């Protein structure tokens, strides 16, 4: 397994970026574009260069870090929104239209204008599980826009590995992807693809011989003071991407890997350190999340918070991701922050660097999460959404929210990609008799209308004996990326809508399981330290009760197929997607499935089912017993 030698930009000076969506790198010097040297060699470059002596200014040196996470190629705002506390009415909320690459660029420009030194960071999942405008260009459109906005670095997320390490290498290095039979638009649609102008970081991804597969860190000079940025991705990546996509890679403990890089950087004179990590947590239960700027972070839980307690004391900030939550926590004096997802928000952390010690000054750190307000925010002048949100923010951030507007150059570039995609995206593929959402019944957990739709589509596509003779289908909820919205029914569904719901391009696999194996698989929906189950979405005919308070191994009761009890030795033909078939999402028992037969792409199965005009079925197939 060759390493993925992504650049380590050592000792580059930080200056404000050029405004307005230019293709130039922020700070002037062009970024390296080729992946020429191994990550380990890149790290060694820092040692050979030496560290510039610290600035002698008496005043602390300011550094503004602007971060977003889990962008997932959401170049267009579409229907993106955030539910935010109404500053003028405590206890009430506002649903605020937000997002889009142009609005993100405009906000970033305003935030850079307000700071002498600024860097833009992404905490991973920049690509993958994305709308058509990104995926049909092999995500080159997203990387292109990030080049133009002036992204300084991206920590690898699990979705960066969706298409495998070789495709990730090509995307960052440049060169056209090989044509595929399914691609309506292939790569290099705008001319030769020259790759990313920012590095991809992950200290805890190892290749052959235990060597880093990606650059573990970058170092940037801020008025003569070196600042290190260490990347990491959730160690659970092998269980949540197609295993073949990470073959030959090891994902090791995030905190230990960050600390190893921190120790190496400190030996080389770098005292100010920042972690950019694609792992996260949650603050409050679903439906009752804490305010994303509440530093107390009530009811916080999740891997990133435990990780933060284990990090080297020199790591002053942890930018997190993965859970698509908004929070701003202070743990042991260290800021741990995340700005939701899809480019709907940004995290801003204003740091002060001590010129004498070259370390961060924790007492001078300020942080906040800000919404990415867009043109739709102002669509209803009477609502005064922009002013109401700005009034609740402290200065200087309130002033930024009042004046930020989408970047016209970035908006035009997005429109260019949208025009190419439009003929395919707008093509009608079917009709639905109502709205299919990913939410379970109120007050319960289990299956959703969207989950039932996708599972039914996969069963219908594989029920014929020639296609596997399936009797039931199971779908992982994380693979259903959007709802299918519908106003007055019936509603026409476009290819773009169907694609956004099923964007991964998995194939269907029919396998044989025994009744005992099926029950064990369903019992494994909640395992180990999982606080809540992750329910596989069942097709029509499969039903059972889930006893939430029962002991492990006894939660699945009254398991039936077409109304008849399933016996332990019963032979069942089960359809899943290829991701699950390889043990994805931790459902490793599916690797034991026998008599496998591959089938259609999941998207093709969904489109075929949409042609039948399905309507939402309100009756859950999983009876939740609290």
Image: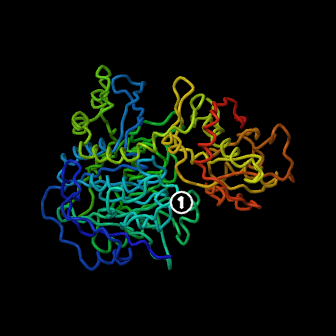
Instruction: Name the image quarter holding residue 154.
Output: bottom left
In terms of secondary structure, where does tag 1 sit? helix
Q: Position of residue 317 (x, y in %)?
A: 35, 55
The residue that label 1 is drawn on is 237
The residue nearer to you, when weighing 196 against 233, is: 196
Residue 174 position within the rendered picture, expressed as x and y whole percent measured from the top left: 36, 66
Determine whether 23 is above or below 624 in the image. below
Q: Position of residue 450 (x, y in %)?
A: 60, 38
Quarter holding the C terminus is: top right
Few, some or many residues within 10 Å of mark 1 (<14, 14–19, 20+)? many
Q: Nearer the viewer, residue 370 or 165?
A: 165
**Relative vertical location of residue 46 with respect to residue 57 in this rendering, above or below:** below
- The one nearer the camera, 366 or 593, is 593
Q: Position of residue 77 (x, y in %)?
A: 37, 39
Picture layout, residue 194 above or below residue 472? below
- Residue at horizontal 18%, vertical 47%? 113
Residue in the foreground of this view, choosing between 324 and 501: 501
User: Can the viewer see residue 357?
Assistant: no
Task: Give the residue displayed 27% in from the left and 63% down from the top.
Answer: 227
User: What scheme was used to colour the molecule?
Assistant: rainbow
Regarding residue 91, the answer to whether it shows in the image is yes
In the rendered image, which quarter is residue 508 located in?
A: bottom right
Residue extending furthest toward the left: 57
Taking the spot 24% from the left edge, 50% from the top edge, the residue there is 21
């Amino acid at each position: 397994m060759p390493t993925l030698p992504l650049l380590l930009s050592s000792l580059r000076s930080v200056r404000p970026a050029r405004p307005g969506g230019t293709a130039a790198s922020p700070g002037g010097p062009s970024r390296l574009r080729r992946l020429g040297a191994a990550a380990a060699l890149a790290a060694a470059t820092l040692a050979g260069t030496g560290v510039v002596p610290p600035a002698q200014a008496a005043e602390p040196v300011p550094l503004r870090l602007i971060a977003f996470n889990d962008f997932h190629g959401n170049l267009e705002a579409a229907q993106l929104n955030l539910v935010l506390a109404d500053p003028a009415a405590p206890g009430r909320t506002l649903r605020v239209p937000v997002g889009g690459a142009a609005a993100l660029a405009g906000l970033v420009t305003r935030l850079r204008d307000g700071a002498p030194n600024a860097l833009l960071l992404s905490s991973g999942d920049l690509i993958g599980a994305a709308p058509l405008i990104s995926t049909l260009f092999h995500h080159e459109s997203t990387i292109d826009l990030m080049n133009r906005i002036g992204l300084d670095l991206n920590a690898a997320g699990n979705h960066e590995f969706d298409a495998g390490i070789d495709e990730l290498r090509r995307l960052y290095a440049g060169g056209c992807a090989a044509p595929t039979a399914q691609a309506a638009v292939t790569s290099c649609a705008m001319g030769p693809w020259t790759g990313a102008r920012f590095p991809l970081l992950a200290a805890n991804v190892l290749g052959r011989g235990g060597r880093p597969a990606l650059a573990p860190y970058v170092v940037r000079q801020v008025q003569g003071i070196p600042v290190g940025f260490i990347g990491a991705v959730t160690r659970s990546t092998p269980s949540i991407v197609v295993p073949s996509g990470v073959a030959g890679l090891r994902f090791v403990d995030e905190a230990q890997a960050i600390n190893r890089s921190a120790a190496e950087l400190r030996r080389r004179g770098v005292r100010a350190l920042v972690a950019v990590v694609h792992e996260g947590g949650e603050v409050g239960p679903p439906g009752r999340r804490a305010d994303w700027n509440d530093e107390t972070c009530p009811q916080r839980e999740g891997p990133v918070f435990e990780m933060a307690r284990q990090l080297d004391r020199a790591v002053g900030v942890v930018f997190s991701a993965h859970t698509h939550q908004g929070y701003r926590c202070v743990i042991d004096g260290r800021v741990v922050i995340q700005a939701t997802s899809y480019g709907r928000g940004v995290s801003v952390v204003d740091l002060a660097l001590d010129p004498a010690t070259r370390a961060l000054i924790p007492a001078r750190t300020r942080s906040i999460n800000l919404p990415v307000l867009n043109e739709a925010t102002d669509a209803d002048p009477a609502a005064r959404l922009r002013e109401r949100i700005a009034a609740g923010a402290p200065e200087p951030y309130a002033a930024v929210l009042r004046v930020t507007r989408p970047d016209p150059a970035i908006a035009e570039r997005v429109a260019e990609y949208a025009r190419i995609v439009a003929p395919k995206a707008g093509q009608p593929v079917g009709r639905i008799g109502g709205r299919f959402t990913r939410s379970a019944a109120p007050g319960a957990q289990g299956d959703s209308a969207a989950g039932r739709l996708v599972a039914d589509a996969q069963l219908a596509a594989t029920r014929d004996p020639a296609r596997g003779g399936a009797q039931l289908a199971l779908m992982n909820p994380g693979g259903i990326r959007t709802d299918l919205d519908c106003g007055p029914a019936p509603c026409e569904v476009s290819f773009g809508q169907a694609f956004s719901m099923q964007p991964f391009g998995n194939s269907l696999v029919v396998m044989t399981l025994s009744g005992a194996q099926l029950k064990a698989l369903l019992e494994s929906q909640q395992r180990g330290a999982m606080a809540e189950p992750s329910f596989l979405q069942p097709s029509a005919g499969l039903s059972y009760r889930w006893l939430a308070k029962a002991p492990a191994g006894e939660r699945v009761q009254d398991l039936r197929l077409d109304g008849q009890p399933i016996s332990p030795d019963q032979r069942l033909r089960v359809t899943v997607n290829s991701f699950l078939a390889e043990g994805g999402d931790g459902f490793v028992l599916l690797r034991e499935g026998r008599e496998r037969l591959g089938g259609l792409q999941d998207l093709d199965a969904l489109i075929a089912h949409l042609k039948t005009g399905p309507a939402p079925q309100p009756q859950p197939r999983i009876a939740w017993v609290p």
